[in-house]
Amino acid sequence: MRGGSGRSVQSRGSSRGAGRVAMGLELYLDLLSQPCRSIYIFARSNNIPFEFKHVELFKDSVLGKKPAAASGAEQPRAGPSNSEGAGKVSLLKKVPALKDGDFTLAECTAILLYLSRKYNTPDHWYPSDIQQRARVDEYLSWHHTNIRANAPKTMWIKVLIPLFTGQPLPSEKLQEVMEGLSTSLKQFEERFLQDKAFIIGSEISLADLVAIVELMQPVGVGCDIFEDRPRLREWRRRVEDAVGKELFFQAHEMILNIKELSNIQIDPQLKEQLAPVLMKMLK
C-alpha cells in the first residue's frame, strides 16, 4: 500500500489500528535517497507502524518547480512535502530523520538499529550472535568507502549534472566511475557474498538491505550492474523475495523513473550557482 504524506503507513498483515498511536513514530524520507529506501523497506517489511513524512529534497531545495502545463492541460498533483519538518526533526537538516515522541534521530544506520531494537525485529536482521553481528558491522563500515563511494555518482553523471549544466558529461567520466564500482563489486562478491545466499549466511540482514538500495541507483539511470554478474543477480533476486517484490519495487519506483527529472525547470541563477559545486563532487 502506498504511504502518502501524513498518512499512517502499515505493512502487510498489520492491523488497521496499529498506526493510530498518539505521538507515534514518524519517518521523514525521500525515496530518491538510498538510505531512506533502506529504512522504508525495513520498517514496512517488519510491520512497524509509522507515519510516512514524504520529503522531496530535489523539488523543494534544489530543482524548483516543473514547467507550467500548456493551456488546458492539467498537472498531476503530488502530496505536500515535509522538508521543513525534516529540518526541525534532524539537527543535521537532512534525511532520513526519525521522530518518536519527543525523541529525534538522524543517520541511516543509527535509525535502522534503533528500529530493530525497539521493535524487536527478527534476529537475522542484526544478529544477537556477536560474530554474526560483527559481520554486519564489518560490511556497513566497508560500504561507505566502497559501494557508496561510486554507485551514487552514476545518477549525478547521467541525470543531475546534465540537468544543471545543460550538456552531457564526457563518457570518460562515467567509465571512470563504473571502473571504480566494478572493483568494489568484485570485492563485494568475493569478500562478502562468496557462495552464501546473503552476506552473513542463509538469511537477509541489514547489510544486504543497505547494499541493495545503493546498487539500484545505477540501475535507475540505465547502468545495469547485475546483467553480467550472475552471482550478484541471484543475490538481488533473493533480497527482493525476502522483503517482498511489491514492496521492493514500490520503494524503488522513483529512482527507476529518475529520468523524469529532465522535465523540471531550474532557475537559471540556481543553475549557475550549483553547476560548479556538482562538478567538484565528482573529483
Image: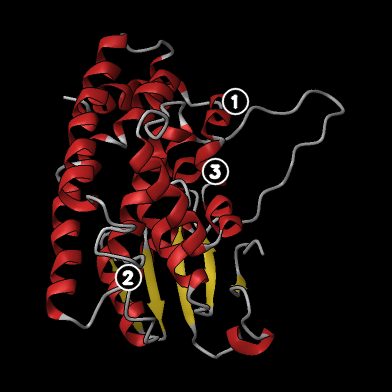
In this view, the residue in front, 33 or 172, is 172
- Residues at marks 2 and 3 touching, judged by CB atoms closer than 8 Å: no
In this view, the residue in front, 3 or 74, is 3
Rendered view: 48 above or below 109: below
- Residue under label 1: 263
- Whether residue 142 sits left or right of residue 238 in the image: it is left
Local packing at callout 3 (Cα closer than 10 Å; few below 14, some 14-19, many 20+) is some
Viewer can see residue 15:
yes
Identify which amino acid the numbered label 1 is placed on.
Answer: Asn
Identify which amino acid the numbered label 3 is placed on.
Answer: Met
Disc on the earlier residue, 2 or 3: 2
Identify which amino acid the numbered label 2 is placed on.
Answer: Leu
In front: label 1 or label 2: 2
Q: Whole-percent x and y of residue 249?
A: 56, 50
Q: Whole-percent x and y of residue 24?
A: 49, 85
Viewer can see residue 33:
no
- Residue under label 2: 112
Quadrant location of the C terminus in the rendered image: top left
Quadrant location of the N terminus in the rendered image: bottom right
- Whether residue 32 sits left or right of residue 69 in the image: it is left
The mark total stands at 3
The residue at 12%/74% (across/down) is 131
| Label 1 secondary element | helix
Disc on the earlier residue, 1 or 2: 2
Q: Whole-percent x and y of residue 85?
A: 45, 65
- Residue under label 3: 254
Q: Quadrant of residue 70?
A: top right
